[in-house]
Image (tube, helix red, strand yellow):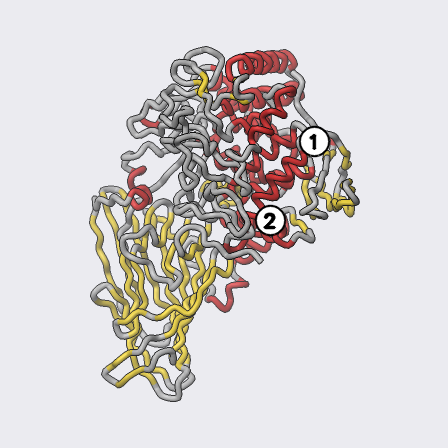
Amino acid sequence: MALDVTVGPPVTIINYGNTFLVSEFDGSITNASDQGFYSRDTRYISRYQLYIDGQPWILLNSATITYYASRTYLANPRVITEHGEIAPSILGLVLSRAVAEGLHEDIDLRNYSCQPLHFNLEILIRSDFADIFEVKAKEFTRRGHIETEWKSAPQQLITCYRHDDFHRSLIVRMEHCTSKAVYGNGRLNFEVDLPPGAAWHACCKYEILEGDRLHEAPEECAHALHRSKTARNLSHWKQVTTQITTSNEDFYRLYRQSVEDMAALRLPRDDEQQQEMLAAAGVPWFVSVFGRDSLIVSLQNLIVYPDFARGTLRRLADLQATEIDDYRDAEPGKMPHELRSGELAHFKRIPHTPYYGTADATILYLIALHEAWKWLGDDLLFPHYQDVIRRCLEWIDHFGDRDGDGFQEYQTRSGRGYENMGWKDAGDSVVYPDGSLVKGPKALCELQGYVFDAKLRVAEGIEYFGDPERAAQLRKEAAELQSRFEERFWCEDLGYYAYALDGDKQPVKTIASNAGHLLWSGIVRPDRAEQVVRRLLKPDLWSGWGIRTLSERNPAYNPFSYQNGSVWPHDNGIIAMGFKRYGFTKEAGMIARDVSEAASYFRFSRLPELYAGVKRRPGTFPVQYLGANVPQAWAAGSVFHLIRAILGLDADAHKKTLYIDPVLPRWLPDLTLHQLRVGQAAVDIRFWREGEATRHDVLAVTGELKVEPRETPGVKEV
């Protein structure tokens, strides 16, 4: 049986949409930490503790029930009161929490002794209204002022923060309480009298006032949680998403958790369009709109919930830049990297309003649009976004290619901008073979692959809609890019592609995982694909838990770093897709095995954003990365890419066809997909191993759909 490995610090996290709570296992929120109750980049509770006559309760056990709810069991310590001694562990306290736009907290006490007990239950609540950027940086500056008001009659505690026109409030409503609260010295105090065997209850509703908009707590108490709107939402999500069955229990748990993580990270496109969803990047740091992340998650989810792409494409189109703004690294046609709504963004002390410091989101937008069109079969997509597509292509050819050499390169112009603008966006993630930092502008290899793929995809779309001349021009541009790319990026001495071209247009001959994305995009010359695959699987990159971001031979390698030797599940999912594209099915299955087995060691079989790149040996386990986002959208979505690689799934909804090329590895002897959607149709399809062969059987079809085998490699001819 796999060990239970804690990812990150030992905390409890529950979340819903833009709102989340990070606490200790005992429910407390400690000082000088990043814990708290947050919504839309503001921390509303920065300190929380339950006391019995001034002493903290003792943790017995706690767990998250589902992504939006938790339960904690506590017992009393030995307490000396004016009424006598209370022996330890004769009082039970159950703390139940459920988060939606606000937080509902139930406190339930029971006297398990044979004597009446009299004591004070105290709730310490502090609010600092800190911006999440300052929490993460651990540099907090008070700018406005905080006022707290206790209203005894309605039993409400109102704490308000005001800084010029930025107003936020936390409203704590005490309801259905067995005894009334009084407030003083930052604590709500209840005088509790409990006869033997008696129970005591209180509902605490934490609601958020953001400007003039109230975000309410769930109405239901813990015992009725299954009847809540959030529970119904989750139940509906499971009904409309693709589900699986398999005899590999670990893989099943990973998939099931990943589907639930996607539910946890859904955001409405905006306040007026609650039904159109896109994915937040992750909790706690990235609960917001992210261009690159949301687009990759949309691609991952095409076999699970293809409509994710609709909200993502529309929201990012709304945010597409229209002017040059150096502070925000914005240029006409560019897609955003990150949108924030906290105090620092409100006063433009950070450029995230939105910030456009991404070199790949604009290109990935075109890839995601085409893939969504193929899976959804919605012929309104391309015409609806034709102006957005045109502006994306113009940005790629003009601003993306800074010096006109036909390659994509980036360099920030903002004083608050990011040094690196690919998916590896840490400041130290792009290094020379000697470990030193690459000087810019930087032309990452994968950016060229993305452009190659995007232009071919747009060509297919616009030809379908009646513009063959423009389609031919785009295919010509893609072919010319591929030729230039092979000439400048291929390093014969390495048998591998350069990580990037540096500011002097010299190849950066660093061995990193990025070349795996080239296989996914299809820009790699077929006769060189095997060398790339074999190089990615050498021990300096392949840890046994997945492919590392950077070779362990590089002086900058650190398995515990963010992007210089760690393993990222989404990176591995994309690489597995690339392996499959060039016909390396066995190798794609090896990556899938590594990542799925790593998941079995983490709590709830939930993949974190990343984990350490330490080598897998007998008796070892994957090692946590402190500060990893959990749940994290593209980590959860990586298993969907792995399934797609193993089964060779592709779709053409216009032809009412699902293409398959299944090769199940030995560790996954059977896999059944239920309600896999293609256009308006859905299919149940079973795959199983028979000797060394993989068979399939179409169990049920709703609507009109053909299932056709199609062999890889599926490299586009240009």
Q: Is residue 412 left or right of residue 225?
A: left
* Disc 1 target residue: 652
Residue lying farthest bottom? 114
Residue 652: image x %, image y %? Answer: 70, 31
Residue 255: mark in rendering:
2
- Look at 62% across and 47% down and name the residue there: 241
Q: Where is residue 468 shown, x and y percent of the image?
A: 65, 14
Residue 604 percent across, percent down from the top left: 53, 55
Q: Please name whichever residue, 356 or 505, is drawn nearer the observer in this view of the structure.
A: 505
Label 2, secondary structure: give it.
helix
| Quarter of the image where the C terminus is located | top right
Q: Residue 342: which quarter of the image? A: top left
Q: Dot 1, how many residues are within 10 Å of its Cα: few (below 14), some (14-19), or many (20+)?
A: some
The quarter of the picture where residue 205 lies is bottom left
Residue at left offset 50%, top offset 23%:
447
Q: Is residue 186 above or below residue 342?
A: below
In the picture shown, does residue 199 fall above or below 167? below
Q: Height in image: 469 above or below 700?
A: above
Q: What type is the residue that disc 1 sits on?
A: Asp
Can see residue 42?
yes
